[in-house]
Image (cartoon, grey):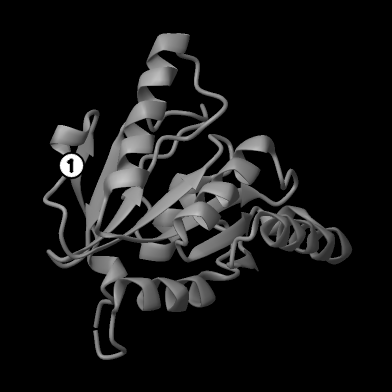
Amino acid sequence: MKSLYQKARFLIAAAHPKQFPEDRGWEVAFAGRSNAGKSSVINRLCQHKGLARTSKTPGRTQQVIFFDLDGERRLVDLPGYGYAKAPPGEKAAWARVIERYLNERRALQGIVLVVDARHPGKPFDVQMLQWCAHSDLPTLVLLNKADKLKRGALVQAVRHMEGLAHETGTAARVLPFSALRGEGTEAARVWLDQRLEIAAED
């Protein structure tokens, strides 16, 4: 029997808040720098290699992408930050759309911040933690590409992000993750289940 995440399907790519789906139900949004592997993380969680578009060129996601799970629950892929080759005016427009989504979306129940485990705590990561603290939103930090680090370095990366979460006042859980090998997948799904109010029998 398929899990709800395996039933995920593309809903809409919104370039403007007017294109967002009806603001009801439950949503969890995925944020992260363009090279953190956000799309690969979504694909791993949903066991669907072609769900979120991945590219060898980071920054390809330039719209707010909504994936529907069951008509009431959605995963949301926010534009990656910090790499995409685009004019400053276009980047500013993306930032405004993201800000509108984060500040106004009532269905938003939590944020998954995808961080490259090799480079934790970049300015955008700290900015997102601060925003999550200000908005009092449950936050899961996935240290993706954990497979590329030795255990000692990974432990250090986890502690670093936990320290930043504490400093910003964010009640965040920090979890090593590997979109390539699947490490952390089940624990991340349990967290998502709680935010999306998915019962065990679903």
Count of marks placed on residues:
1
**Which residue occupies 11% across, 51% down?**
22
> For this view, does 49 lie left or right of residue 112?
left
Local SS, label 1: loop
Vertical placement of residue 193 versus 81, above or below: below
> For this view, does 144 lie left or right of residue 53?
right
Residues 136 and 81: in front is 136
Vertical placement of residue 164 versus 95, above or below: below
> For this view, does 61 lie left or right of residue 115?
left
Residues 49 and 24: in front is 24
The x and y percentages for residue 138 are 47, 66
Amino acid type, residue under disc 1 in the picture:
Phe
**Which residue occupies 29% across, 67% down?**
6
Residues 160 and 103: in front is 103
**Which residue occupies 31% across, 89% down?**
200
> For this view, does 164 lie left or right of residue 142?
right
Residues 3 and 133: in front is 133
> Furthest-right residue in view?
152
> Furthest-front residue in view?
134
Query: The N terminus lies in which quarter of the figure?
Result: bottom left
Q: What residue is disc 1 on?
A: 20
The x and y percentages for residue 201 are 25, 90
Q: Sort mark 1 into few (<14), some (14-19) or many (20+) by Cα contacts within 10 Å.
A: some
The x and y percentages for residue 202 are 24, 84
**Which residue occupies 25% across, 56% down?**
106
